[in-house]
Image: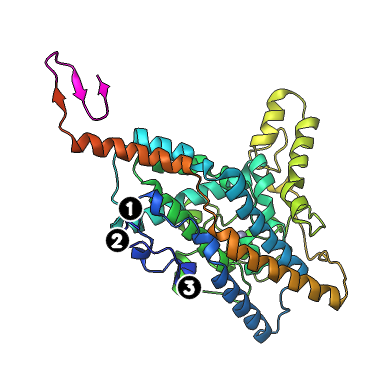
Amino acid sequence: MNSEFANSSISLWDMFYVGNTRRHMHKDVEHIPQHIYAQAWPYFLILLVLENGLRLWQKKDVLRLNDSITSMSHAILQELFAKFVFRGSEHCLYFWIYANYKIYELPWDSTGIWCFVAIAVDFCYYWTHRASHEIHIFWAQHQVHHSSEEFNVTVGVRQSVFQSLVGVLCYVPLALIVPPVLLLVHQQLNLLYQIWIHTETISTLGPLDYVLNTPAYHRVHHGSNLYCLDKNYGGVLIVWDRIFGTFQELRPDKPITYGLVYQKNTFNPLALQFFYNFHVFHKWNIMKGWKNKLRSVVKGPSWIPGLSWTGHDGRRASVPGRRKKYDVKISFAFKLYLLIHFVAVIYGYSIYLTEIPRLYSGPVRCEAASREITSRLVAHDVTRASDSRLVIPDLGYNY
Ligand SMILES: [Zn+2]
Ligand SMILES: [Zn+2]
């Protein structure tokens, strides 16, 4: 590794965004550990055991096997799509803008800049997440994360395979000053932080509740009760919600019903990944006029003609109280088989899939080529030929 500080492994502290910053400083994208998120599996499993221990101690039910396996299957699907379908292509626009239009190059090895970028990426995450809820076609993807009727750490890894595409434009302004390597690291660490806040076992973080997104705030975000809808979009910091008017405290008098307003009763991860897109298509079909058809795709899921972008509370569908959770009764032997089978899948995943890079060579080459040209321009004396044309001999370019 070229990087002075680079270390491809992560620590348990990284799950809380308080790991050693120097471990995640990399000079360029060629040396970035592309597996930060995937390497977190052992720590995720530690959190899973801890949470269940706490739930038992607090006399709550332990996690449901069917729902938890479904959630973790989404994580594997997301990783498969990232590594075999997208392969980092969602970052191409960012790389291209940074290579061609950056106005300043922030240093990669400054702790101050590292912290600044952490906050900037979190700010962009807020808008990505808000767009995921308030733009119908984006919600059709993000609803996967909200499709569990439970709230535990396994829900933290239940993600849409298309989620990385949803947020592309929200991060692009950073490309004017933030090196891609810093963006990629912070995007992954930001997601890691968001895993542990999916728990009902922690009610408060004390004074940190003013600035951080906490399990209590995120419980609200996952509620399908009316007062919970479109609230608490923050990733690591809750201050963005306080500033932009989307903050909502947990209300102990209103028990939260987790899941979608129109819950899809299945544990099939593929069905949950794609079913909502048919709703978007259906809404498009029943709208009159092309303007309304277009609005039905880009405005909020509850929008109908005549209402504001996200609809208004009087017309919004919500879940008024408790509802019976979807369940499938199977024998203990079958549950045991499922558990053993899934552990084998996770083992195979952690051995093989985590080693495959998420970034294909395209974005990396793009950045490397731009650096190569810059360094060669600096390394070679640029001489003016006798005919006054600017000549850069080593590259063979005549201007
Ligand atoms: Zn959400
Ligand atoms: Zn969540």
Please state the extent of the stretch shown in magenta in the rendering.
Answer: 385-399
Q: CA distance from mark 3 to mark 1?
A: 23 Å
Q: Mark 3 and mark 2 in contact (Cβ < 8 Å)?
A: no
Q: Main secondary structure of the magenta part?
A: loop
Q: Could you say whether the residue bearing mark 3 is in a helix, strand or loop?
A: helix
Q: Which residue is mark 1?
A: 27
Picture coordinates of residue 399 (x, y %)? 24, 19
Q: Could you say whether the residue bearing mark 1 is in a helix, strand or loop?
A: loop
Location of residue 343 by image quarter = bottom right
The local crowd at label 3, few if under 14, some if 14 to 19, many if 20 or more residues have their Cα within 10 Å, is: some
**Residue in front for this viewpoint, 239 or 70:** 70
* Label 2 beta carbon within 8 A of ligand 2: no
Q: Which residue is mark 2?
A: 4
Q: Residue furthest bottom?
A: 57
Picture coordinates of residue 228 (x, y %)? 65, 58
Q: Amino acid at mark 2?
A: Glu
Q: Which residue is mark 3?
A: 12
Residue 216 visible in the shown view: yes
What residue lies at 37% left-to-right and 53% top-to-bottom?
A: 117
Where is ligand 1, by quadrant? bottom right
